[in-house]
Amino acid sequence: MSTYLAFLRAINLGAKRVFPKDEIRRAVESVGFEDIATHINTGNVRFTTRMRARGRIEDALERAFFENRGFPVPTIVFRADQFADLAASAREVSATRPDAARHYVYLLKDELPDDVIAQVEATSGPAGEMIVRGRAVHALLAPGYQNGTVDPLQAAKLLGIATNRNLTVVNALADKWC
């Protein structure tokens, strides 16, 4: 059995998309996955399964989440070793920008084509930088970024199905689960 981490998108953002941790665990258990754990109530879940195909795992989870909640919950899955590599890369990227005020990591369902990578990275400017590394996009925002030219939401529109976590959460999950 392999260990996976799943990241749920757009839950617990308002009264209509509530998905408590206990319900997430029940939904994951309902598809036969085991060793389930959650981290804070923002849609971070670890589990083990004999399934190997990421697409099949994501489909099974998305169906279970819809059955449990009645609304779609896009889900991005990484094997634990892949997420550990992603977190190590995030730390390396962060170390090159010690002056960044914020570091958000967008987790992608699918890798971006080269032309979209160029568009995302072109949103960089003096107030921050967008860096694409595989299925992760790093938003490194400089102090005062709110008044600057980098707009992570503008770049996020190019990412397809994605969700973000700050670097602190990425590191905590890698330390705890990988």
Image: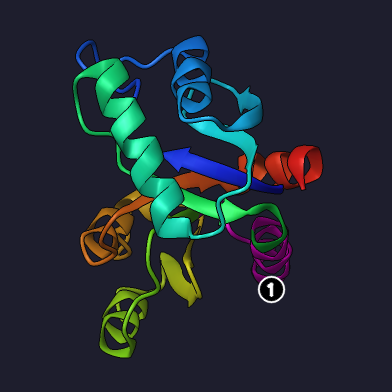
Residue sitting nearer the eye, 163 or 4: 4
**Is residue 15 placed above or below 128 in the rendered structure?**
above
| 69, 141: nearer the viewer | 69
**Residue depicted at x 32% and y 37%:** 62
**Magenta segment boundaries in residue numbering:** 83-104
Which secondary structure lies at badge 1? loop
Residue 160 visible, this angle: yes
> Which image quadrant is residue 39 in?
top right
Q: Looking at the image, can residue 9 be seen?
A: no
| Amino acid on which the number 1 mark rests in the picture | Thr
| Residue in front for this viewpoint, 56 or 119 | 56
- Is 99 inside the magenta-drawn segment? yes
| 171 left or right, relative to 79 | right
Residue 4 on image: x %, y %: 62, 47
Please state the horizontal and vertical placement of residue 178, each as a whole percent of the image. Answer: 77, 48
Q: Residue at x 40, y 53 (%)?
A: 56
Structural crowding at the residue carrying mark 1, measured as other residues with C-alpha within 10 Å and reported as few (<14), some (14–19) or many (≥20) = few
Residue occupied by mark 1: 96
